[in-house]
Amino acid sequence: MATVAKSQQQPAAPASGAPPWALLDRLLSAIYEGPLESPPWQSALQMLRDHLQAAHVTLMLRPPSPDSAGVMINTGTTTVEAVKSYETHFFALDPFVRLQEGQVVTAEELIGKQWLESPVYVDYLKPLDIRHLLGADMYTRDGIECRLRITRGHDAQPFSAADKSLCVALLPHLKRSIQLHARLDSLECERQLFAGTINRMLLGIISFSQTGQILEMNQEAKRILGEKDGIWLSGTTLTADSVQEGRELQRMLKQAFSDHPAEEEGPGVVQALSITRPSGRAKLGVLIRAIPLGPWSESRQRPGTVVFLRDPESSGAQPSQELVRRLFGLTRMEAQLALLLTEGLTLDEAAEQMNVRRNTARTHLRSIFSKTGVTRQTMLVRLLLNSVISLG
């Protein structure tokens, strides 16, 4: 169902004399480029709206439900009130839903004359000057359900057979493009999950293309390089303060740029280097490795080499006491003591910071040992550091 307000301007007329194949070519190009747009398919929907001289073209990527407002992409003039009223109320009264796969029909063809007496038309569409409604639904094996809805006003002509034929021709391509978008969205969710985990582990990452161009750099890498304490960026080139370390760094990068094994050959040689910091702080750790080429890799702008940076003195956000409590079944005081010990404090120092007596701290420590199954403080620290608390 279109969830849009009355358009205040006449839709653009289609290009006169354009051959059908040329129109189809433009529409298909826009459909397959749609997953890379934001909002997706905006260009294709606008192009279809212009050609059909429609008031609105709406794609429901996720139709509204009692549990969710859904996700809709609208072309044409819209208002927040009109969209919200459909998402929160009229979607439940809409009979023009769950159309047969590949079918392109008008509301009246599907429902009959009683469509014009339905509450959705009388109370919602008619006040928005929506008279003609054309629709099609798409379903995938992954459980995706999308709805395409096209509208015209009361002063416009009904949709013709040619209009329907064009939509029928576009539907399989739009469905494939939606499936590609779902796959890209899944990969992006995974990327953000892993990137967030890496950031919480305080590991700096710089990815380079096969030609040596920097493609991406996370926040920790920017922080380390921004300090210019032993290593920094000169333009797009990693540079070290120490001449000898700088030469070794460039040699390692050059080798990594030229070393791109195929995926089935496994990862390339991993190289590592310590970078001295003039400030006197602990040396930075640098690890460089080439990223294997996939079996069908063709882009030279794909990540080809990654540089990992680790600052041993970097201190990230303290894991929550609640997470430690849940994970190991500790009390609040026990969790606080365990975290202080992982920071390198002695038992006496931890007791002082907690404002408790040393004997009280020792009692808590014995209880922690009993609950975690370790017998020494070093074992406890190792257990905590190797647990999932750093990911929380």
Image (cartoon, helix red, strand yellow):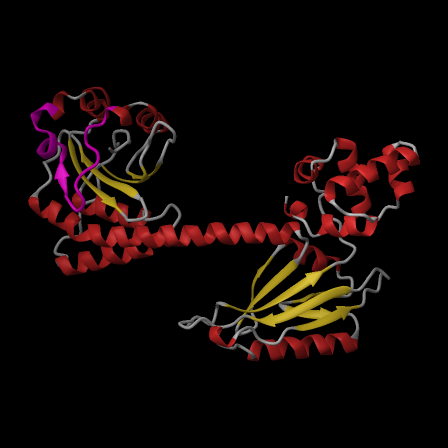
Is 11 drawn above or below residue 297 in the view shown?
above
Residue 271 lies in what quarter of the image?
bottom right
Does 374 sit left or right of 38 as displayed? Answer: right
**Quarter in which the N terminus is drawn:** top left
> Residue at the location (62% across, 60% down)?
205
**Quarter in which the C terminus is drawn:** top right
Residue 267: give x, y in percent of width and height: 55, 73
> Residue at the location (32% across, 24% down)?
85
> Residue at the location (14% across, 43% down)?
104
Residue 99 lies in what quarter of the image?
top left
Please state which of residues 338 and 229 is positioned toward the viewer in this rendering.
338
Residue 235 lies in what quarter of the image?
bottom right
Does 260 sit left or right of 313 as displayed? Answer: left
- Magenta stretch contains residue 190: no
Is 293 drawn above or below residue 143 in the view shown?
below
Does 343 sit left or right of 248 as displayed? Answer: right
Is 247 drawn above or below residue 329 in the view shown?
below
Residue 326: give x, y in percent of width and height: 66, 36
Residue 112: give x, y in percent of width and height: 8, 28
Please state which of residues 326 and 107 is positioned toward the viewer in this rendering.
326
- Magenta stretch contains residue 108: yes
Task: Magenta stretch: give its range.
Answer: 93-114
Please state which of residues 14 and 360 is positioned toward the viewer in this rendering.
360
Please state which of residues 226 and 118 is positioned toward the viewer in this rendering.
118
